[in-house]
Amino acid sequence: MEDKIKRLRQFIEESDYIVFFGGAGVSTESGVPDFRSKDGLYNQHDVRFEKYRPEYLLSRSCLLNEPEVFFEFYRQKMDTRGIEPNAAHIFLAKLEEKGKLKAVVTQNIDGLHQKAGSRNVYEIHGTTAKNYCARCGKKYPADYIFESPERIPHCECGAMVRCDVTLYEEQLPGEAVEKSINAISKADMLIIGGTSLTVYPAASYVRYFRGKHLVIINKDHLPYRLDPEKDLEINMPIGQVFSQV
């Protein structure tokens, strides 16, 4: 493992345009549950929501057809305002500050990269840190939904206020997707961290990488074709890896 950390450090030193592509595993070390693992959000048995499929509870259909159910689940499970960034978030922010890291492409919606200090963050699944009126588009802060006395939060125009999260059945935000693909295609080093690369279409963006070094940091092995001479896979929690770098 020491040799792999040394190689990762070497790759970083010789690269000038690094892009990080991350998933739920980046935030689990901060205490944010992922979705699909045995301890993940979809496997947390809650009698209030047992009759619903987990994907439905975070879907556009649920928001529109059963908004009270949607917002109860959202308030109970998606509030990360009190969560702090971990070593992975902090390392990436410092790497950006040094001019090495050009972009963070994240599937996470918790805003922890920005909280750690990262500025160039493309949130391809949206964020819980922003809300807006479904009718007039007026923007509302992160606290609005979580602290609203109404079971269904409303705008001053009378319409429902919703989270700026890409729900099931919705398209990914076009601008964030375009910027993500552009950054990955320009990168000379791509670090994939804390993701199983099973959530599409986001996972497909990796194919745009044409640079020199591809690095995968994930607790579980990913069946991804790597060049042993110029690529690297480390099967450890990403926060632990970056702490050693």
Image: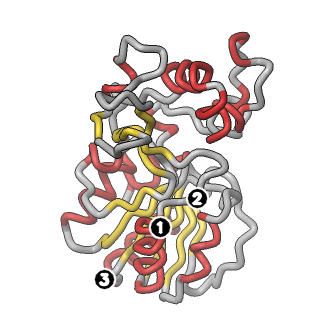
- Give whichever of 29, 228 is nearer the camera: 29
> Can you tell which mark lies on residue 171?
2
Verify CB contact (< 8 Å) between mark 2 and mark 1: yes
Instruction: Kindly state the secondary structure of the residue where label 3 is placed.
Output: loop
Pinpoint residue 124: horizontal percent, then vertical percent.
48, 58
Circle 3 is placed at which residue position?
A: 16
Label 3 to label 2: alpha-carbon separation? 32 Å
CB atoms of marks 3 and 2 within 8 Å: no
Q: Tell me the quadrant of the picture where the N terminus can be found.
A: bottom right
Asked where in the image residue 231 lies, by quadrant, the reply is bottom right
Q: Is residue 217 left or right of residue 168?
A: left
Mark 3 crowdedness (10 Å alpha carbons): few <14, some 14-19, many ≥20: some
Residue visible at 44% across and 41% down in the picture = 134
Q: Position of residue 84 (x, y in %)?
A: 33, 33
Q: Residue at x 57, y 66 (%)?
A: 216
Give the residue type at disc 1: Gly
Which amino acid, by three-letter code, is at mark 3? Asp
Q: CA distance from mark 2 to mark 1?
A: 8 Å
Q: Which residue, given by chain and number where applicable, does mark 1 sit on?
A: 174
Left or right: residue 173 versus residue 130 is right
- Image coordinates of residue 232 in percent, x first then y, are 57, 73
Q: Is residue 186 above or below residue 121?
A: below
Quadrant into which the C terminus falls: bottom left
Amino acid under label 2?
Gln
Point out residue 200 in the picture as x, y percentages from the top left corner. Answer: 67, 62
If you read the primary sequence from the N terminus, does the residue marked by circle 1 or circle 3 appear first?
Answer: 3
Q: Of the two numbered discs 3 and 2 on the same chain, state the one appearing first in sequence.
A: 3
